[in-house]
Image: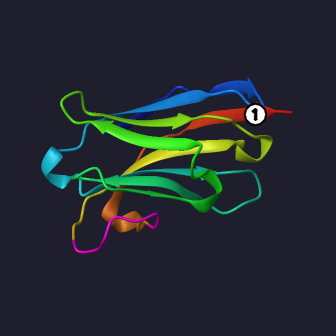
Amino acid sequence: QVQLVESGGGSVQAGGSLRLSCEVAVSPFLRYCLAWFRRAPGREREGVASINAVDATTYADSVKGRFTISQDNPKNMLYLQMNDLRPEVTAMYYCAVETVGWKPCSLHFRMDDSVWGQGTQVNVSS
């Protein structure tokens, strides 16, 4: 059963914007932390932004001030607004939900404790 479905990726020129969306079919009682990750070709997966149940957010230094994570619980949606896009953010973007609450919400998820989507590709050209 697919529990997370991302959309909104695409190809844009540098300086443009994209809004990623993630449909979250995970019980609200298990949504301890929601986050966006990305993996660029030849690079490790990295956390981009996270948000917890009380809307406290964490961002990677490289995206602070340009990306905004938000959630709409009644609509079961997670979003990532990305502004002033740069070529170096080209990557596959994944949404993920951490289903355990014993650790603070962060940009580091354990695969055994989380659910992941299939990803949406973002390409930024110069």
Task: Identify the residue shown where x is 50% and y is 32%.
Answer: 20
Q: Where the N terminus falls, by quadrant?
A: top left
- Magenta range is 102-108
* Residue at the farthest left position: 29
Mark 1 lies on a secondary structure that is: strand
User: Based on the displayed image, in which of its 4 quarters is residue 67 positioned?
Assistant: top right
Image coordinates for residue 28, horizontal then vertical, percent:
16, 45
* Residue at the farthest right position: 126
Q: Camera-side residue: 95 or 61?
A: 61
Is the residue marked by circle 1 packed among few (<14), some (14-19), or many (20+) residues within 10 Å? some
Compared to residue 67, the image places residue 23 above or below, namely: above
Compared to residue 123, the image places residue 27 above or below, namely: below
Task: Identify the residue shown where x is 23% and y is 43%.
Answer: 26
Compared to residue 90, the image places residue 23 above or below, namely: above
Q: Where the C terminus falls, by quadrant?
A: top right
| 111 left or right of 101 in image | right
The residue wearing badge 1 is: 124
Task: Identify the residue shown where x is 25% and y is 59%.
Answer: 99
Q: Camera-side residue: 34 or 111?
A: 34
Q: How is the image coloured?
A: rainbow
| 58 left or right of 90 in image | left
Taking the magenta stretch, the answer to whether it contains residue 113 is no
| 92 left or right of 49 in image | right
Q: Amino acid at mark 1?
A: Val
User: Based on the displayed image, in which of its 4 quarters is residue 74 positioned?
Assistant: top left
Q: Is residue 126 visible?
A: yes
| 24 left or right of 116 in image | left
How many marks the image carries: the answer is 1
